[in-house]
Amino acid sequence: PPSVAMGPPRVLPVLLAALLSHLAPALGTLCARPGLCQPPAGNEARCVDISLGSCSDVSYSQTTLPNLLDQKSRGEIEYSPEYILMGVLHNLLQGECNPDLRLLGCSVVAPKCEGGKIMKPCRHVCEALRKSCLPAFDAIDMAWPYFLDCDRFFVSDLEGCFDPLAKLRVKPEFKYIGNMHGNEVVGKELLIYLAQYLCSEYLLGNPRIQTLINNTRIHLLPSMNPDGYELAAEEGAGYNGWTNGRQTAQNLDLNRNFPDLTAEAYRRAKIRGARTDHLPIPESYWWGKVAPETKAVMKWLKSIPFVLSASLHGGDLVVSYPYDYSRHPLEEKMFSPTPDEKTFKLLSKAYADAHPVISDKSEMRCGGNFVKRGGIINGAEWYSFPGGMADFNYLHTNCFEITVELGCEKFPMEDQLYSLWHQNKEALVKFMEMVHRGIKGRVSDKFGNPIENARISVKGIRHDILTAADGDYWRLLPSGMYVVSAQARGYSKVLKRVTLPAKMTKAGRVDFVLRPLNGKPPQIARDAMRRAREQLDPLEHFDPHAQHVQREPRENGERPWWWSYFSSLHNHKPLWLLKHH
């Protein structure tokens, strides 16, 4: 009003205070809505021990109250929709999202407290998980949770953040893949048996299994070709031939559907100084017919830095290893070793020697023609083919993959499964333990910042591996003496001499600290290169969760099926999970 504007200056503070007092309830309601108001958070805090069950396995021991959501007590946190969501989210997403998402939530609900200061989680970790998990949220019509807002509750490396998944990343990543050919079903059943065995033995206190699980991230894919399995199962066990169900619903053989990088590796091997590892997928590959199963596995390989793998097949009893494609395309049976021939033989022998039938010296049995070779064989020497998954793992990623043929009968009767499990149980566990052979470590700059995509080279072996996003690496090697180097664009090269004793069963720790060539870390250049690679990569735009059938539009007021999980919350239901609220 004019009278207010014309009044003496001392009247304004009084009127302003009265106005704010009148609006306080409305402002309180407004700020209660997620994302609208954020109170200034100071770094000073009182550190207390973590007592939340869902966050008991985080990499730190102390948190602070109130937390980043301004929840002031353990009880308030445990009865909050945010905390309840963290406990059920993996099941709601039907396992289609990385389970690490729970630990990401813990970094907000129970933030790290160190030396009386709050440590906020790193934004790049949040962004990576959001990118991989968002399709799974879309598939069940759920909005991304507000408390996992990467811009609001997470900070950059320059602001001094901590990685909530750091504890996990010191573990090597291992995978088993079964049923790549739909009519080769033993691997599918064995991986189901294996999952049950690992869980039950862990709970029973088996020290070997507990050590394995506590120090390894194990991924099991029982069936890569469920459509082919359904077709083979229609004929029934014992009656299935050698071809029905082998291929996918699109009539594609998945073990011939990966990019043929082996021929390119042979070509580059003739060029002095040319790299023969981490080869790019040629653009021409995408012009052909690529199975969605193949794309999904390739995207999986890109998202997780796997170290070791085995693909379980059927039709013979032997362990084969790369290369699977001959050095000479016209030679169907030609020994074609990788630069890591010794390592692959060590890995293959670990499985074969632990299998009572493969290691049996009798030649009058299934797989008897491989007895003189010790139950293992180079894939191309057995029979050559391009587009195989094992060669792709080795030439495009850090992962070493072998192929295990589990028996001459591809679709055995049910009563044979138990004996097949006992024949393979020790071999399956022994091979997983092999992921801890060789060396491991971290590559960082002098300030402790991780260096991604640094090259780990071993003198005399023309095959490098790259560090993961947190600068960590695992390099499989047999026993011996090695000269190992680490180098990255914009940094100086560092060399170290390493000795691995013959009886050493755990990976030796070899860390590297690199110094920038011009005195400043080339972070901007690395970020630009990463964005360029993602922009050109067709896998970045492939969504394995995409629905082929369009969902019916939801009627006004109708809640999604998962809403019942939060029915007990009454007035505190997470409306922020509803996409159109």
Image (tube, rainbow, N blue to C red):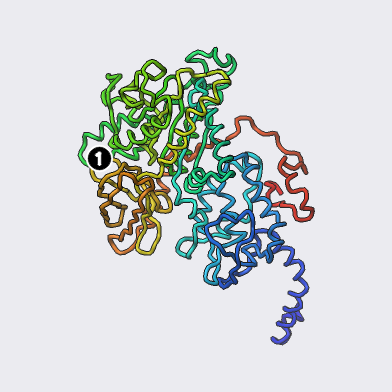
Quadrant in which residue 383 is drawn:
top left
Quadrant in which residue 309 is drawn:
top left
* Front residue of this view, candidates 254 and 544: 254
Q: Quadrant of the N terminus?
A: bottom right
Q: Is residue 396 left or right of residue 543?
A: left
Q: Is residue 389 left or right of residue 136?
A: left
Q: Position of residue 291 (x, y in %)?
A: 48, 27
Amino acid type at mark 1: Ala
Please name the residue shown 21% across and 34% down the image: 270
Compared with 190, 95 (above or below) is below
Q: Position of residue 415 (x, y in %)?
A: 58, 20
Compared with 225, 163 (above or below) is below
Quadrant in which residue 44 is drawn:
bottom right
Going by the picture, which residue comes out furthest to the left? Answer: 272
Q: Is residue 321 left or right of residue 2?
A: left
Q: Is residue 304 left or right of residue 398?
A: right
Please name the residue shown 38% across and 45% down the image: 505
Q: Secondary structure at mark 1?
A: loop
* Front residue of this view, candidates 3 and 98: 98
Does the image show residue 143? Answer: yes
Please name the residue shown 73% across and 46% down the image: 565
* Front residue of this view, candidates 152 and 253: 253
Compared with 272, 258 (above or below) is above
Q: Position of residue 438 (x, y in %)?
A: 34, 45
* Front residue of this view, candidates 154 and 472: 472
Q: Mark 1, residues whose alpha carbon is within 10 Å: few (<14), some, or many (≥20)?
A: few
Give the labeled residue for mark 1: 274
